[in-house]
């Protein structure tokens, strides 16, 4: 047992595993004969990492789960058959209650851009907290002004007026309201399979058209998804775009206030919009008097590697850009950026946000932007992401269950199917592989309309060694199905 564990775990993880006397080896033994595993398998080895978390003395995973069931919303859910109690994080790694280390290949999209607990971001937050935690925008404070200036410098054209919010949901709600006020129109067009937030308006615009997210809202219309894998027009974006033009021509959507879309659908399964789609749709919307909103909550902030924002890969410039998650590296902060002309419309209303743009969050956000540039994380996302995508493409040739590999930079998707010709979603199989990968020390997300797509979105400090380990663990897990 010790020799097998040593081959998979680093030294510190191995001793944590032995001390806790739990889970890891027994879970492998349930799946196959231990002697066979010892004799034949070459298990992936996690890259070395010079950090050990302090001992955890809090409640166990079971105790937390019990409280969660009793006191938290029943709509909340966990990944994995045995939910993970995460108690510590450093760069691209997370640690559980027993001190075991996991490679985080998903948390980047959730919140973390430049790595868990980056010391420069932490220092900026602590330093600002010691001076002033909160001050309304009715007073002056340099933290919000400095970050707004830095953020505006990363956007093209006349996009330079920033409204800070507390989340991506709030940013998209505000963006849609601004568009309606500016144009005097009411109707919003979004794309099926998109995700824009979890308030009433953004859930209406989310357009997943099923029980999970869709909340019917007046004036919200769902256009055909330019899905290059399952869509009827393949990668011909202009053919999908005609659906939006038809909505306008035949009066299906009334008077258009805005079109909102992600450049790469995150929750929708890392689905990159078909080439030619956004330029055609933006042209139709502008001719109809509407505004174009780019939801960069997941694809923005250098994640795609070749550009800082996802929409840039399509050669378009939106009227409004929304962002959150990675912008604060885990802090509750989002933003809406638009032009001075469009921003002026809010002077006709009394718009105010008590916590949006507070000094602590804006100081932390500014530090994140500085770290991205200082550590060249956009370049790293391109280099490591391209390397990992190439390796995953080779894995597709080996395993029939992989139907598609897609995405850009460190925003990658692997879609699992039980039949490549029929593209039958492998819904049960992906859960099995996820659990296997977790037991071997890799955390990865899932999404897509059918819940059968791996969402690979690690912190941007992910290395080639991490990519190799991820690849090897996924390969091993699929080989054991």
Image: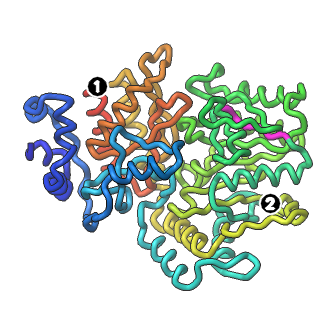
Residue 178: image x %, image y %? Answer: 82, 54
Q: Gap between marks 2 and 1, in whole Å?
A: 53 Å
Above-or-below relation of 353 to 108? below
Taking depth in this image into account, of 163 and 271 the one nearest to the observer is 163
Above-or-below relation of 125 to 468? below
Please give the label number shown on residue 339. Answer: 2
Considering the numbered disc 2 on the image, is that residue within a helix, a strand or a loop? Answer: loop
Q: Is residue 34 left or right of residue 481?
A: left
Q: How many marks?
A: 2
Rate crowding at label 1 as few (under 14), some (14 to 19) or many (20 or more) other CA atoms within 10 Å: few
Q: Is residue 389 left or right of residue 439?
A: right
Above-or-below relation of 70 to 54? above
Please give the label number shown on residue 481. Answer: 1
Residue 90: image x %, image y %? Answer: 36, 62
Is residue 267 among what the camera can see? yes
Residue 458: image x %, image y %? Answer: 43, 50
Q: Which residues lie in the magenta part? A: 187-192
Does the segment drawn in magenta span residue 126? no
Residue 30: image x %, image y %? Answer: 19, 32
Considering the numbered disc 1 on the image, is that residue within a helix, a strand or a loop? Answer: loop
Does the segment drawn in magenta span residue 191? yes
């Amino acid at each position: 047992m010790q020799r097998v564990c040593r081959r998979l775990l680093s030294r510190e993880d191995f001793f944590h595993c032995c001390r806790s006397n739990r889970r890891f080896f027994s879970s492998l033994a349930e799946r196959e004969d231990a002697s066979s595993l010892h004799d034949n398998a070459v298990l992936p080895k996690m890259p070395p990492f010079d950090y050990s978390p302090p001992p955890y003395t809090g409640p166990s995973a079971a105790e937390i789960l019990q409280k969660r069931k009793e006191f938290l919303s029943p709509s909340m859910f966990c990944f994995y058959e045995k939910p993970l109690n995460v108690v510590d994080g450093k760069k691209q790694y997370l640690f559980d209650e027993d001190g075991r280390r996991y490679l985080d290949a998903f948390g980047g999209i959730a919140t973390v851009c430049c790595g868990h607990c980056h010391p420069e971001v932490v220092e900026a937050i602590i330093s600002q907290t010691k001076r002033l935690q909160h001050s309304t925008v009715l007073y002056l404070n340099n933290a919000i002004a400095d970050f707004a200036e830095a953020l505006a410098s990363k956007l093209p054209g006349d996009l330079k007026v920033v409204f800070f919010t507390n989340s991506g949901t709030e940013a998209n709600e505000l963006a849609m309201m601004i568009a309606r006020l500016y144009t005097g129109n009411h109707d919003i067009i979004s794309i099926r399979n998109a995700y824009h937030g979890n308030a009433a308006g953004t859930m209406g615009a989310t357009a997943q058209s099923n029980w999970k997210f869709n909340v019917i809202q007046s004036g919200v219309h769902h256009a055909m998804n330019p899905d290059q894998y399952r869509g009827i027009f393949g990668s011909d974006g202009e053919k999908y775009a005609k659906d939006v033009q038809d909505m306008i021509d035949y009066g299906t959507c009334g008077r258009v206030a805005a079109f909102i879309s992600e450049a790469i659908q995150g929750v929708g399964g890392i689905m990159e919009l078909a080439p030619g789609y956004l330029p055609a749709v933006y042209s139709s919307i502008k001719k109809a008097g509407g505004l174009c909103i780019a939801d960069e909550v997941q694809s923005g902030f250098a994640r795609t590697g070749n550009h800082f924002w996802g929409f840039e890969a399509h050669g378009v410039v939106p009227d409004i850009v929304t962002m959150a998650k990675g912008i604060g590296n885990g802090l509750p902060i989002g933003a809406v950026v638009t032009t001075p002309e469009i921003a002026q419309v809010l002077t006709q209303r009394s718009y105010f946000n008590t916590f949006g743009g507070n000094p602590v969050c804006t100081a932390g956000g500014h530090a994140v932007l500085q770290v991205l540039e200082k550590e060249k994380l956009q370049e790293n996302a391109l280099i490591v992401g391209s390397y990992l995508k190439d390796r995953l493409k080779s894995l597709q040739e080996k395993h029939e269950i992989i139907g598609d590999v897609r995405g850009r930079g460190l925003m990658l998707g692997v879609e699992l199917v039980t039949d490549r010709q029929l593209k039958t979603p492998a819904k049960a199989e992906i859960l099995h592989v996820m659990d296997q990968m977790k037991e071997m020390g890799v955390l990865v997300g899932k999404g897509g309309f059918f819940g059968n797509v791996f969402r690979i979105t690690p912190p941007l400090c992910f290395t080639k060694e991490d990519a190799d380990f991820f690849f090897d663990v996924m390969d091993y897990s699929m080989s054991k199905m």
